[in-house]
């Protein structure tokens, strides 16, 4: 994977956004991307920038609201393939431990 992005799509509403966010995440299934959702957005990986943009557009359009806020931050590494997992592993190597303070045995 060459292109990594952080995508955040949310309706501008006062009630819970989870249902609409779920629609945005589900829209990614139609594209050749890998993704992982976290509390602040969804990390997407794709081989081609066009596929990433198409997936982001589909996620944005999947949200049914009068107003939708979308943020897309892209890391397009053009000279070599670096996955999101590799980036995390590099930080772990520098820290000498996982980059979290949560106990993996605590169930959180």
Image (cartoon, helix red, strand yellow):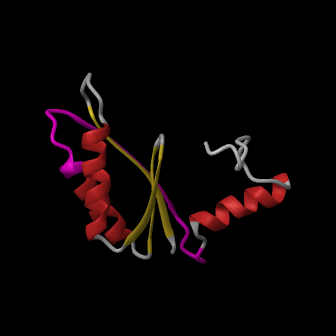
Q: Is residue 34 left or right of residue 22?
A: right
Quadrant in which the C terminus appears: top right
Q: Residue at x 58, y 69 (%)?
A: 83
Residue 75 percent location from the top left of the image: 52, 60
Extreme residue toward the top, this view: 14
Q: Position of residue 104 (x, y in %)?
A: 70, 49
User: What span is colored magenta in the figure?
Assistant: 60-81
Using the rendered view, name the quadrant where residue 41 is placed.
Answer: top left
In the shown orientation, is residue 99 left or right of residue 31?
right
Q: Is 63 in the magenta?
A: yes
Name which quarter of the figure residue 13 lies in.
top left
Residue at position x 85%, y 55% from top?
A: 96
Measured along the vertical axis of the image, is residue 15 above or below residue 47? above
Query: Relative to 102, is 48 above or below?
Result: below
- Between 107 and 71, the residue placed more toward the observer is 107
Q: Which residue is at a point 23% across and 58% down the rendered structure image?
A: 58
Q: Is residue 104 left or right of residue 20?
A: right
Residue 36, given in percent of the width and then of the height, sits at 47, 57
Counting every numbered tag in the picture gives: 0
Q: Measuring from the top left, give residue 37's x and y in whole percent.
A: 45, 52
> Going by the picture, which residue comes out furthest to the right?
96
| Observer able to see residue 17 | yes
Mark yes or no: residue 57 visible: no
Residue drawn at x 62%, y 45% is 107
Between residue 52 and residue 40, name the one nearer to us. Answer: 40
Residue 61 among those drawn in magenta? yes
Instruction: Indicate whether 12 appears above or below 3.
Output: above
């Amino acid at each position: 994977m060459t292109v990594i992005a952080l995508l955040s799509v949310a309706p501008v509403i006062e009630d819970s956004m989870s249902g609409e966010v779920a629609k945005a995440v589900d829209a990614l299934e139609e594209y050749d991307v890998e993704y992982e959702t976290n509390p602040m957005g969804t990390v997407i990986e794709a081989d081609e920038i066009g596929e990433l943009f198409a997936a982001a557009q589909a996620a944005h359009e999947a949200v049914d609201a009068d107003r939708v806020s979308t943020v897309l931050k892209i890391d397009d590494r053009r000279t070599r393939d670096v996955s999101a997992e590799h980036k995390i592993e590099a930080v772990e190597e520098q820290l000498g431990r996982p980059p979290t303070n949560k106990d993996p045995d605590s169930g959180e």
